[in-house]
Amino acid sequence: MLHRTGFIWIIVVLVALRILGMVLVPLTDTTEARYAEIARLMVTTNDWITPWFKPDVPFWGKPPLAFWMEALSFKAFGINEFAVRLPSLLATLATSWVIWRFALLTGTTRTARNAVLIYITTALAYVASGAVMTDPFLTLGVTWSLAAFYLAPTAPRWYWRYGFFLGLAIGLLAKGPLALVLTFAPIVIWSFIHRSGTAQCHIKALPWLKGSLLTLLIGLPWYIAAELKTPGFLNYFIIGEHFMRFIQPGWGGGERSVRQCAQASQRHYLAAMADGVLSLGFDCHRIASWQNGCSAGP
């Protein structure tokens, strides 16, 4: 059995080795270099709404959460490899904390230690923890939402009840609608399996109306501001990145597609977004009107 001291030492060594690599290893591929340059331009131009490929070409492929964190790190520690990679490490450590708390509340201390060690020693998670990527932030958001959904009936603290919606906001600002798919797909499957009553218990435990408003309050303003500042963004990101890239041969994104999508009218997409917000509001009101009380636990 792994004791507390041994567990802490393993974590310290793993983090220290990752920090060493973050300092000594130069930016290693096109993704790191591109995202680091986007963050650098965010600092030099002081434009915190639109990420830019270069001064005259916006980068519409990802929302800005990772770039915001990397730009703030540049401001704090200077323009260097360690600074631009640090936010990914912090996001990974935050995800590890969520996993720790979830495993501790649903199992034992031994389970929690093993869960954290399995996560941070997974090759992809360990590499991403010290790389300039958006994935650590998406992972944090989805993990927090799923853990909060499961724990809300039995651990009704604010960071679980509202953590579900905060996780959604993080995911929307880190990767976009993909976060909704990765969060709700397993919940729908799990709810179908446990449709006898357990699923309703978890659904009722969440503050859907206030929580959904919190998600919209955090995540929606940037999408509106980005469309208003660079018209065509919603067309490119929502339609292009999530649909056209899979069904239209030769659709490669990048500068050409950005300029093509900039010709699209923003009015249609803002109207569609408003309709979606209203629909979500009605759905949340319906959920909130259900009978209170839940006797069955997870």
Image: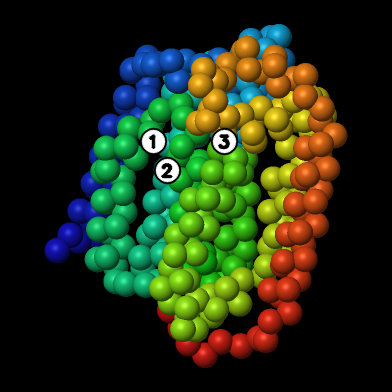
Whether residue 43 is visible to the viewer of this picture, yes or no, is: no
The residue positioned 47% from the left and 78% from the top of the image is: 195
* 148, above or below 289, in the image: above
The CA span between labels 3 and 2 is: 26 Å
The residue positioned 46% from the left and 37% from the top of the image is: 135
Residue under numbered circle 2: 92
Horizontal side of residue 237 vs 274, given as left or right: left
Picture coordinates of residue 102 (x, y %)?
41, 65
The CA span between labels 3 and 1 is: 25 Å
Residue under numbered circle 3: 242
Horizontal side of residue 57 vs 294, given as left or right: right
Instruction: Report the amino acid beneath label 1.
Output: Ser
SS class, disc 3? helix
SS class, disc 2? helix
Picture coordinates of residue 143 (x, y %)?
46, 54
The CA span between labels 2 and 1 is: 6 Å
Q: Earlier in the sequence, mark 2 or mark 1?
A: 2
Instruction: Report the amino acid beneath label 2.
Output: Thr
Whether residue 168 is visible to the viewer of this picture, yes or no, is: yes
Nearer mark to the viewer, of 3 and 1: 3
Residue situated in front as seen by the camera: 145 or 36: 145
* 251, above or below 213, in the image: above
- Of the 4 image quadrants, the one containing the N terminus is bottom left
Q: Which mark is residue 129?
A: 1
SS class, disc 1? loop
Picture coordinates of residue 270 (x, y %)?
81, 39
Q: Earlier in the sequence, mark 3 or mark 2?
A: 2
The residue positioned 77% from the left and 53% from the top of the image is: 277
Mark 2 surroundings within 10 Å by alpha-carbon count, few (fewer than 14), some (14 through 19), many (20 or more): many
Query: Which residue is at the far left?
Result: 1
Q: Which mark is residue 273?
A: none
Nearer mark to the viewer, of 3 and 2: 3
